[in-house]
Image: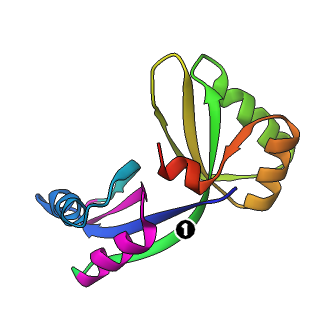
């Protein structure tokens, strides 16, 4: 029930993101969701793609520093309080959220929240015991 994410370290300058997206497009790799965090000098682009191995390979071949991280994808109804329901269960078990980002496939249906937890196995266990839908990588890559 874990998902593989790639993180790309890039310079914070015009054209950097375009370069990454062009490389992935040319390699026929589809971006499922992403998050970009920056500082004044560099950015960290986190991506879930349909082919993690190919993306990592082609980006490294083009000079990028790329790492692979395990994250958890949780499906939740797209309505007020959806994220809070997850957070109340996680907080009660003293599990920390390192970061998260989300996307909605179709408004009014379900959102998918991508979490990086300090203890992913404990998070998966508590989420499943509380009837949350934890998505497999294969399911997420195919959206």
- Which residue reaches farthest left? 14
Q: How many marks?
A: 1
Q: Residue 114 in the image: x percent, y percent?
A: 56, 47
Dividing the picture into quarters, in which one does residue 2 lie? bottom right
For numbered disc 1, what is the local secondary structure? Answer: strand
78 and 98: which is toward the camera: 78
91 and 77: which is toward the camera: 77
- Residue 91 vs 123, above or below: the answer is above
- Which residue does the image show at 81% across and 37% down from the upper left? 89
Question: Label 1, on which residue?
Answer: 69
Q: In this image, 132 relative to 48: left or right?
A: right
Q: Residue 90 in the image: x percent, y percent?
A: 78, 43
Q: In this image, 79 relative to 117: left or right?
A: left
Classify the position of the N terminus by image quarter: bottom right
The residue segment tinted magenta is 40-61
Q: Residue 42 in the image: x percent, y percent?
A: 28, 66
Q: In this image, 110 relative to 31: left or right?
A: right
- Which residue does the image show at 63% across and 36% down from the upper left? 75
Dividing the picture into quarters, in which one does residue 65 lie? bottom left
- The colour mode here is rainbow
- Which residue does the image show at 28% across and 76% down from the upper left? 58
Circle 1: is it few (<14), some (14-19), or many (20+) Cα within 10 Å?
Answer: some
Q: In this image, 16 relative to 57: left or right?
A: left
- Which residue does the image show at 37% across and 73% down from the upper left? 54
- Residue 123 vs 9, above or below: the answer is above
- Residue 117 vs 133, above or below: the answer is below
Residue 124 sits inside the magenta stretch: no
Residue 50 sits inside the magenta stretch: yes
């Amino acid at each position: 029930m874990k998902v593989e994410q790639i993180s790309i370290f890039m310079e914070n300058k015009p054209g950097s993101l375009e370069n990454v997206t062009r490389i992935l497009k040319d390699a026929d790799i589809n971006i499922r969701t992403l998050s970009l965090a920056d500082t004044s000098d560099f950015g960290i682009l986190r991506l879930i793609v349909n082919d993690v191995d190919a993306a990592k390979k082609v980006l490294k071949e083009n000079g990028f520093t790329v790492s692979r991280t395990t994250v958890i994808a949780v499906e939740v109804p797209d309505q007020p309080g959806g994220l809070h329901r997850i957070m109340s269960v996680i907080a009660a078990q003293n599990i920390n959220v390192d970061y998260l980002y989300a996307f909605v496939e179709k408004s009014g249906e379900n959102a998918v929240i991508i979490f990086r937890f300090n203890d992913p196995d404990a998070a998966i266990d508590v989420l499943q015991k509380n009837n949350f839908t934890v998505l497999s990588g294969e399911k997420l890559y195919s959206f």
